[in-house]
Amino acid sequence: MGFRLVQERRIVTALPGPTSASLAERRKAVVGAGVASTLPVYVADADGGVIVDVDGNSFIDLGSGIAVTTVGASNAAVVDAVRDQVEHFTHTCFMIAPYEGYIAVAEKLTDITPGDHEKRTVLFNSGAEAVENAVKIARHATGRDAVVVFDHAYHGRTNLTMALTAKSMPYKSGFGPFAPEVYRAPMSYPFREGLDYDGSSITGEQAAARAISAIEKQVGADSVAAILIEPIQGEGGFIVPAEGFLPGLAAWAKDNGVVFIADEVQAGFARTGAWFASEHEGIIPDLITMAKGIAGGMPLAAVTGRADLIDAVHPGGLGGTYGGNPVACAAALASIEQMETLDLNSRAREIETLVVSRLDAVAGQVGIIGEVRGRGAMLAIELVEAGGRQPNPDAARKIAAHALQQGVVVLTCGTYGNVIRLLPPLVITDELLLDALDILEDSIRTVAKDQ
Ligand code: PLZ
């Protein structure tokens, strides 16, 4: 694959540079303080594995704008598709004057989502909107109210999705009251079983039984419209549940007429080395929510799932002005095609092998890495107090800051803020990735010395 920008790490000014610093001043005067940015620099260009700022610094991107630019931030095929579409029409509103792109995206999602049952798709703009609509569909189809979510879950920032999200600060604090009929069940978080819950490590099946027991006792199966879960939790800390946990929940849902919704907003679209993370344990969700990687950076989201559930909603019951915007649909078709042509599912698995072997070696040598985990190119390092398991958010913050100063963008996450997550664009070159790993390793070692 060819790139427009030189694929290199290049720091040529102090960070932030003078042009970024002046933009930061302008921003302070006009942009709401509630919107925070991780980087102190402002973007001029981005392509493949690099982000170039307004002062000419080139950063290696290990975040993909939170798992969005899987095919790169200016993938030529996506750019062409978008250009071609905007030259014809930018918008007509699918609810007013429909067009083919929407149907073509729905056909594609029918093909690539797990299961060969009859499916339907509805398109939206953001992950939160997809999640809200999946809940609307589940409630409508079942005639039940309750929604079960999990510890450490992240589902969005709208009123219903704040209620579904676990973490108070910064997502919920001061923004209540929240939507009712949302119940939280214990997650399977293998690394923290012994700390968060009493008792030692338990199997995935036991963790599922624990969650199911809580649901049956506290809510009652008959009241539950849906179980909503991220097959690999994103913002909560890249938590991969113990094997058997997801199948246990899915089987219980099926037996009890509960809609099983997989929130694949962060994990979907080749990120984990499969089209969807549900596939790693053979799960066939009733509904899947998608966004982020679906459209190469254009805002698009989807709910795909069982035709009987989605078609239970009356005509006109679902929609929105921009949902399935034609430009975003064109970008999605081109992005998914790129994932197929470049075999990005395999690429994600290659990245896993490369990164994990490297990080495991470092983990054995410093005392502050509790665990290296994840699947494909959705990988994480959980930082702990040296020698123990106490979360170490300070180390995570310092490592990310140190790496940034050398020109590598890594994001943090986690209920305890102590997880560094790696989400490189899947089109990143090996050379660039290895350079980024050198920097990350150096940052970990430097910070570990002071802990
Ligand atoms: N479901 C699983 O990861 C978005 C949010 C970052 P939207 N995650 C990044 C932030 O601080 O706002 C996400 C997700 C999962 C839903 C969402 C929500 O997707 O497109 O941000 O609405």
Image (cartoon, grey):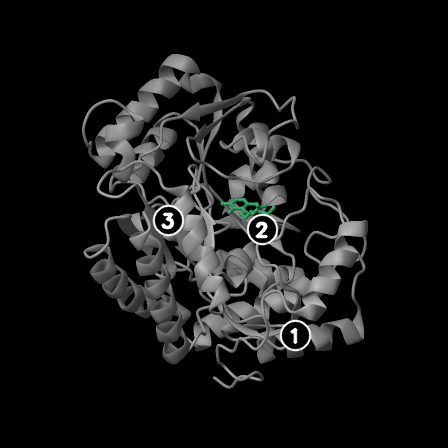
Q: Is residue 86 above or below residue 239?
A: below
- Pair 1/3: label in front: 1
Q: CA distance from mark 2 to mark 1?
A: 37 Å
Q: Is residue 303 left or right of residue 327?
A: left
Q: Nearer the viewer, residue 256 or 239?
A: 239
Q: CA distance from mark 1 to mark 3?
A: 42 Å
Residue under numbered circle 1: 55
Counting from the top left corner in percent of width and height, residue 336 is at: 51, 68
Q: Is residue 439 left or right of residue 338?
A: left
Q: Is the residue marked by circle 1 packed among few (<14), some (14-19), or many (20+) residues within 10 Å?
A: many
Respond yes or no on whether mark 1 lies under 8 Å from ligand 1: no
Residue under numbered circle 3: 278
Query: Dividing the picture into quarters, in which one does residue 360 lie?
Result: bottom left
Dot placed on the residue nearer the N-terminal end, 2 or 3: 3
Q: Nearer the viewer, residue 403 or 91?
A: 403
Task: Name which residue lies at 81% across and 59% down.
Answer: 92
Local SS, label 3: helix
Residue under numbered circle 2: 302
Task: Name which residue lies at 41% across and 14% down.
Answer: 218
Dot placed on the residue nearer the N-terminal end, 1 or 3: 1
Counting from the top left corner in percent of width and height, residue 203 is at: 20, 34
Q: Is residue 267 visible?
A: no
**Amino acid carrying mark 1 in the image:** Asp
Counting from the top left corner in percent of width and height, residue 95 is at: 76, 50
Assess whether mark 3 and mark 1 are in contact (beta carbons under 8 angstroms): no
**Amino acid carrying mark 3 in the image:** Ser
On residue 366, the disc is none
Q: CA distance from mark 2 to mark 3?
A: 16 Å
Query: Dividing the picture into quarters, in which one does residue 326 lie?
Result: bottom right
Local SS, label 1: loop
